[in-house]
Image (cartoon, helix red, strand yellow):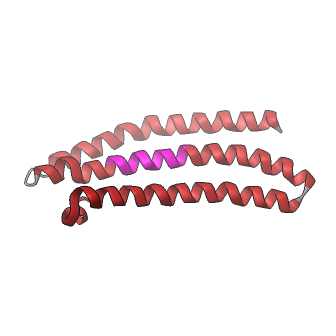
Amino acid sequence: MQEIAAAVREGSNAYLAAQFKKIGPLIILITLSFISRTLERLMLSVGGVPGAFLVGSIFSFLVGFVGMRLATQGNLRVAAAAKRSYGEALQLGYRTGTVTGMLTDGLGLLGGTLIFMLFGEHAYEAL
């Protein structure tokens, strides 16, 4: 199982690296297009929409990376636990998914909260 898990982990890391190489430049281009789109409100156009997009992209990448890491490690543990007990395997799988879900929710709330703290009543324009 460990040999298979190592191969899966290697494949998932290769997938994430290839995905980021393709999506990373696109994220930069979209961020730059938001900056150049409007100069009326310099603070909002430089820090607001592109900043929110960039932070959201970074948080999304972080969730994908951590989620993939947890999934590959969790699957190995669930497979090993399934030999002993169905209940233990189910509990491990549930906990692994819960951590990833809470990270997704937590980073989303953190990003939204930071935007509201920085831009106050103009936060809706940044979002």
Position of 7 with respect to 65 (left or right) is right
The image shows residue 91 at horizontal and vertical percentages of 77, 60
Residue drawn 49% across the image and 40% down it: 19
* Residue that sits furthest to the right in the current view: 84
Position of 115 with respect to 20 (left or right) is left
Image quadrant containing the N terminus: top right
The image shows residue 26 at horizontal and vertical percentages of 35, 41
Q: Quadrant of residue 23?
A: top left
Image quadrant containing the C terminus: bottom left
Q: Nearer the viewer, residue 123 or 14?
A: 123
Residue drawn 22% across the image and 58% down it: 119
- Per the rendered image, the range of residues in magenta is 54-65
Residue drawn 11% across the image and 49% down it: 42
The image shows residue 32 at horizontal and vertical percentages of 23, 42
Q: Quadrant of residue 29?
A: top left
* Residue that sits furthest to the front in the current view: 117
Q: Considering the whole magenta stretch, tell me its main secondary structure.
A: helix
Residue drawn 85% across the image and 62% down it: 87
The image shows residue 37 at horizontal and vertical percentages of 16, 50
Q: Nearer the viewer, residue 29 or 45?
A: 45
Reply above or below: 56 against 15: below
Residue 64 part of the magenta-drawn span: yes
Reply above or below: 74 against 123: above
Count of number-bearing discs:
0
* Residue that sits furthest to the left in the current view: 40
Residue 125 part of the magenta-drawn span: no
